[in-house]
Image: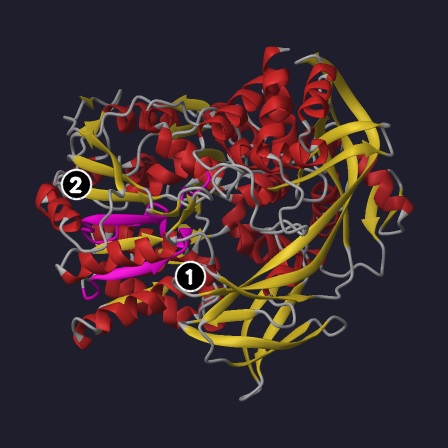
Amino acid sequence: MDNAAFLAHLRSQPGYDGQIVHIENIGAREAAYAELDEPLEAALQNCLEEHGLSNLYTHQAEAVNAIRRGKNVIVATSSASGKTLCYNIAVMQSVLTEPGTRALYLFPTKALAQDQLRNLYELFYPALMSADSMATFDGDTPRSERADIRKKGRIVLTNPDMLHVGILPNHPAWSGFLRHLKYVVLDEAHIYRGVFGSHVACVMRRLRRVCAMYGSSPQFICCTATIANPGEHAGQLTGLPCEVIDNDGSPRGRKDFIFWNPPLLDEKKSARRSTHFEVTGIFTELVSQGTRTLAFTFTRRLTELIYVYARKRLSEVSYNLTRLIKPYRAGYLPEDRRKIERELFGGQLLGVVATNALELGIDSGGLEATVLDGYPGSIASTWQQAGRSGRGKGESLSFLVALNNPLDQYFIRHPEAFFQKDFEHVLTNPENPYILREHLLCAAWERPLDDDDEKIFGDSMPDEREVLGEEKRLRQRRQKWYLSPSVVYPAQSINIRSSSGEVYAVVDVTTGSLMETVESSVAFFQIHPGAIYLHQGESYLISRLDLTGKVAYAEPNSGNYYTTTKEIHDLHIIKERETIKAGGVEVTVGDVEVTVNVVGFKKMRQFTEEVIGEEPLDLPPITFPTVALWFGVPPQAFTSITASGLDFAGGLHAVEHAAIGILPLFALCDRNDIGGVSTPLHPDTGRAQVFIYDAYPGGIGISEKGFSMITELWEATLKVIAECPCEEGCPSCVQSPKCGNNNKPLDKAAARVILEGLVKG
């Protein structure tokens, strides 16, 4: 596409008001090649040559060499750099030279597994592999085919969820496969972070344990987008040392990366036009001009919302265009997802609005443009999403449309902080006690626990095993620990993508049919009474939430609004872990108990984001233990605020909101992964405090990361507040859309005084 011509077209539109704030011209890069230490089997070499893949990039050759030396590896290179070939070559070489070889490919989504199976077929069938020797095995696999896959499959593609709930608990049926398992591939390893990553790390340890029982010790091959700590992350995931391969030799085409800021509607309040409205406009302009485009959103709800907006706008241009776009997200029936994937890869669709389910390494069929509805929460994810377009040597466009929050606006004002910043650290915690205990139960189902398991599960394993014994979920006999009779198939009750294994059913009251399921950890925020729930572009009102039966009843709704919850958070200190002196105050990290009350919700008008109503909610509190960091206020800052007549409580509240908004700059997380509390007098310390905590039971490492970089966090937070042009505080700096106190009190000036005191020390 002609990037310059399209940008000129956007600038000529009636709604354009200087939204393009930065254009990063990313130049093309030539390929760098390297040789293998030893030649491949002739049949494999011929196959690669036939597909134009015989010349290997530097990182591909290094990875294959290391794998053939028996090393566990993690390949950390850019999007579309050919990481898949690193493991496919190594696996196929072994399959050809050692006929018993088996390989397990793990992908975070079913869509990616399907795409990679297509890739295997295109490369190796029928020349090297039979059709039944390569197969996906997941929740969509017909039961009639599963026995054949277990028996004949040499390369089985699945996801960590199926490994956890379907394969490992039934390992006797997989004994032949596991006995000869030589390679385990963990693709898109950067996705395995936080709670999900901690669960996956425990699943990998269970896999190693079961394989050892059958006499195998598979090599691990991990692939990831560029992150700051690939070796550490791979070690956390697998429990084994991994060699890092990051010498990226792949070529790339020219890309223009646009930072787009919605225009101001009220300069004093720093109110901006809706980000979702702007995304819809860019997306529909691209589609209208025949440009194949993928728009990314944060949530299922936004995916549906922007699809609805885009369909309406395109209908004003041409009805035919409305049939060339689709939404894509988790929750759809398997056949619906497969159909959308086929249409996207086959070129029948011009545009798709998707969650990060399509962020991953799927060859999306020659996309020319990507549009990001807000900063995805990490630099790695931003590049992954932007990298879905221009997967070759041609020109491409990517747009990051900023949300009106502290982190997005920080990057808008400081694009160099994005384009020149190092990638973030990926955080996982496989020894999170609440996660580890559940996987110890699963491991005991697979084989009784014994003292040797500490080598696999870590130093905290004996303590957590004792807790399970006290809870009478495990019982000891002859130096082994067995499941209690009351515990049956524990994997079934554990959802590895959330901190809770329970789900709520969403039922259409007009038909009585099940529409979707929603994790209980987010149920009060998404399907509370009065919530608007979007499903495949259609709007539903949640008329009732059955807390006992865990069922939400939805009825069709024709309103033009959506809903967002309001919450109040409370916190109690359980144990201080470490305290340091910084900025003239004590900064502490420790264990806390958090109570969250969802107290109401706002009705937001579609397109304009205007608040058109608020209603209270009466739901039970959510209480969980986690990890937090907390700090106080320099005495001179308190004196200055008092003398100036500023609001001290409002200043603390504003610091809390702004710091939560900017913390994802330092840790690979989303704002929703973090919570906070601020108070002029906390009962547990007797002092004014600002708390920031991990919003998951047991913690996932975010607070510890913030604690280790507290001065940098204060500096970045101060910069956000000082540079925001609003007068009294706005969503770009100190307001939070989820504040249960309606963002009151907030005092931007007082927050600045506090942060200046902390930074100066």
In percent of width and height, residue 665 lies at 48, 30
- Describe residue 752's horizontal placement relative to residue 630 as left or right: left
In percent of width and height, residue 367 lies at 20, 51
Residue 356 shown in magenta: yes
Q: Nearer the viewer, residue 517 or 33?
A: 517
Quarter of the image holding residue 346?
bottom left
Sequence order check: which comes first, mark 1 or mark 2? 1
Mark 2 residue element: loop
Disc 1: CA contacts within 10 A as few (<14), some (14-19) or many (>=20):
some
Q: Is 33 situated above or below 332? A: above
Q: What stretch of residues is rendered in magenta? A: 348-377
**Disc 1 designates what residue?**
329
- Describe residue 235's horizontal placement relative to residue 265 as left or right: right
Q: Which residue is drawn at 22% across and 53% down?
A: 122
- Describe residue 395's horizontal placement relative to residue 477 as left or right: left
In terms of secondary structure, what is the magenta stretch mainly? loop
Residue 197 shown in magenta: no
| Separation (CA) of disc 1 from disc 2 | 26 Å
What is the image's colouring? secondary structure
Q: Which residue is drawn at 43% across and 29% down?
A: 227
Q: Which amino acid does the dot numbered 1 rest on?
A: Arg
**Disc 2 designates what residue?**
392
Mark 1 residue element: loop
Q: Nearer the viewer, residue 612 or 8?
A: 612
Q: Can residue 665 be seen in this view?
A: yes
In percent of width and height, residue 483 lies at 81, 52
Q: Nearer the viewer, residue 517 or 248?
A: 517
Q: Is residue 476 visible?
A: no
Q: Which amino acid does the dot numbered 2 rest on?
A: Gly
